[in-house]
Amino acid sequence: MNSEKKERRQEQLAKKAETIKAFASHIKMKNATELTIDGHPYRLISNYREGFNIEKLEERFSSILTKYDYILGDWGYDQLRLRGFYASNSKQGSSGQNIDHIQDYLDEYCNFGCAYFILQNLGESKPGRKPRRNNKRGYHSTDKRNDTGEKMYRSRRRNPKHKNYKKKRSRDNKTNRGFTIRQK
């Protein structure tokens, strides 16, 4: 029975290795500091304690990281963790995702003295999305303005009756009743 479990476990590990290979990125080193990942050019800026490992980077790299200007890879518990950062002059992302805050990230979230590397994206970053419209003002708010830019207001027809006002029925008007109330 133990041999069957071992065989099943080995089959599972083999399938996992195949899927990792299928989704792995292709990394090609041009020289000691320049490389391409799936056709995107990168430069190795920092390699602290020899943290750069091509095989693990191929397994862990995701195409989502191509939008960042810098990629930090740090090691913790024998696992590579990748995190993207934007350039200091970029308006994308929050201030914590700025390359100027990379040392804060290393101090706060990484193990003390862990090996890490920093890659710089040399390719053109894709243009960001257009900001979405604020639809709180209405769908075509510009159509409601006249030539001077002033907002036009529609006059409401004033109804003298209140919304909760019910029409008084006379007791003689029994045509609308579907049943009769027996009175004593």
Image (spheres, helix red, strand yellow):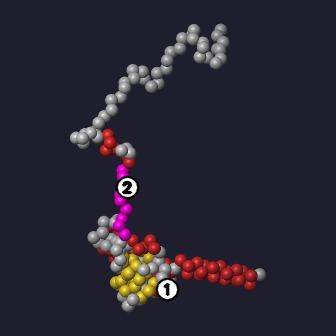
Up/down of 154 relative to 126, above or below: above
The residue under the point 35% across, 67% down is 127
Q: Quadrant of residue 51?
A: bottom left
Up/down of 64 relative to 8, above or below: above
The residue under the point 64% across, 18% down is 178
Asked whether the residues under the numbered discs 1 and 2 touch, taking CB atoms below 8 Å apart as contact, a structural biologist would say: no
Determine crowd level at label 2: few under 14, some 14-19, many 20+ residues with C-alpha closer than 10 A: few
| Residue 45 appears in the picture as rendered | yes
Up/down of 127 relative to 143, above or below: below
Q: Position of residue 66 (x, y in %)?
A: 41, 74
Q: Position of residue 173 (x, y in %)?
A: 57, 11
The label shown at residue 55 is 1
| Residue 104 appears in the picture as rendered | no
Q: Position of residue 61 (x, y in %)?
A: 47, 77
Q: Residue furthest front?
A: 147
The label shown at residue 132 is 2
In this picture, which residue range is highlighted in magenta?
A: 126-134
Q: Secondary structure at mark 2?
A: loop
First along the sequence among labels 1 and 2: 1
Q: Position of residue 93 (x, y in %)?
A: 35, 66
Up/down of 56 relative to 149, above or below: below
